[in-house]
Image (spheres, grey):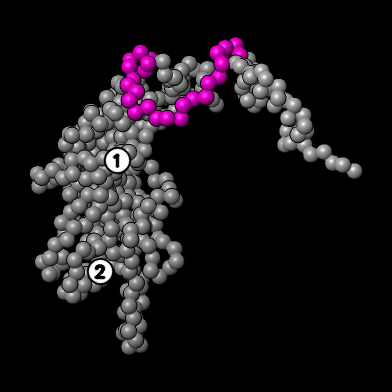
Amino acid sequence: MKRIRHSSNGVRPDELHTNEKYIDRKPATGYAALPRAAVMVAPALEAVTPRPYQRPARVYDAGFAVTDAYRATLPDLQNGPASLIQGSPVAIQQVGIHNFRLPLRYLTRDGEPLTLETSVTGTVSLDAHKKGINMSRVMRTFYEHKDSLFSLDRLEEILRDYRRNLDSLEAQLTLRFNYPLLIESLRSGLFGYQYYQVALEARLDRAGAVRRYVHFDFVYSSACPCSYELAEHAIMERGVAAVPHSQRSVARISVELNDFLWIEELHDLCLDALKTETQVIVKREDEQAFAELNAAYLKFVEDAVRLLHVQLDREPRIKDFKIVASHQESLHSHDAVSVLVKGVPGGFQPALDPYAFATMVYR
């Protein structure tokens, strides 16, 4: 039996050849010239596109200049009517841009400005009847302040610009950067730079009130009190050498301020509380000193958050605080963690975010 091959669209080759001859004799124009898929998807396309379809030029026009008249013709969906909203027509608490980066200048305690690469997150609220925000205004508004000397006061100015430029009721801004401090070794007198993960945050509410926050990571060594006593027992009772375990640990401090506080001062509060900060430049005398320091200030994770509580609670410029500690155990294959808040009504909550601990690992 002779088989007849068909094309992928079900048309026989001889029929296809015949159709091609008709096409050659009478080229289609307008609606008929559109691909079959376009005809099926948009049957009323002829009414809105009466002119013949023209294939667009695949060439970038570097000399094209945008005029105000041309700009006025560009689609602007985010400012469209409420009928364009997809999903529930409800208000959105925060919407904006995360992690746009640029170098910013900060004033240090010693009076010298410091330029640091900064990751910025800027968000505003969106009313229920609005389709979206103008995302570029989040960045463009921030860039108007890029040459300023940054502090929490500067963040308040930007938030008020956000609310005006994006026609929003609430706004939030966070700056993240690594802040260097020159730290002296314990006994050798050498100095090295320690870098601290810092975030400055400001929130503007509907009433126009601004709340200011600083988030600060402090890395320290925690020597286990139980392990120390067990090691001492082995030495004293059996004459067997034993080494107690210790581990790199991280305390993430979040404070709400009612007055200005230097980042250096927040570091000092952490150091006064925990004592055993990890070192930068270490010679033999420094390593020995660090071993003695750990023995003098043994601590469980419960001890760490309570020691920090003492220092933060007595600082009058700190309105509220939250302490999250993670002791990344060398004995166990898991970590010991703790959360402690001051307990201010409407302030920080003790909710434990399991994803936060993945960001508290320092290598």
Q: Residue furthest bottom?
A: 239
Magenta stretch, residue numbers:
46-72
Q: Is residue 214 left or right of residue 15?
A: left
**Which quadrant of the view contains residue 52?**
top right
Q: Which mark is residue 294?
A: 2
> Tag 2 or tag 1, which sits nearer the N-term?
1
Can residue 8 be seen here? The reply is yes
Picture layout, residue 285 above or below residue 134:
below
Q: Nearer the viewer, residue 16 or 139?
A: 16
Name the residue: 33% across, 20% down: 66
Residue type, numbered disc 1 = Arg
Determine if the magenta segment contains residue 356.
no
Q: Residue furthest right?
A: 1
Name the residue: 19% across, 66% down: 281
Determine if the magenta segment contains residue 58.
yes
The residue at which mark 1 appears reads as 101
Can residue 256 be seen here? The reply is no
Name the residue: 74% across, 36% down: 7
Q: Nearer the viewer, residue 8 or 279?
A: 8
Within 10 angstroms of label 1, few (less than 14), some, or many (20 or more) residues?
Answer: some
Name the residue: 26% across, 43% down: 118
Tell me the quadrant of the picture where the C terminus can be found.
bottom left
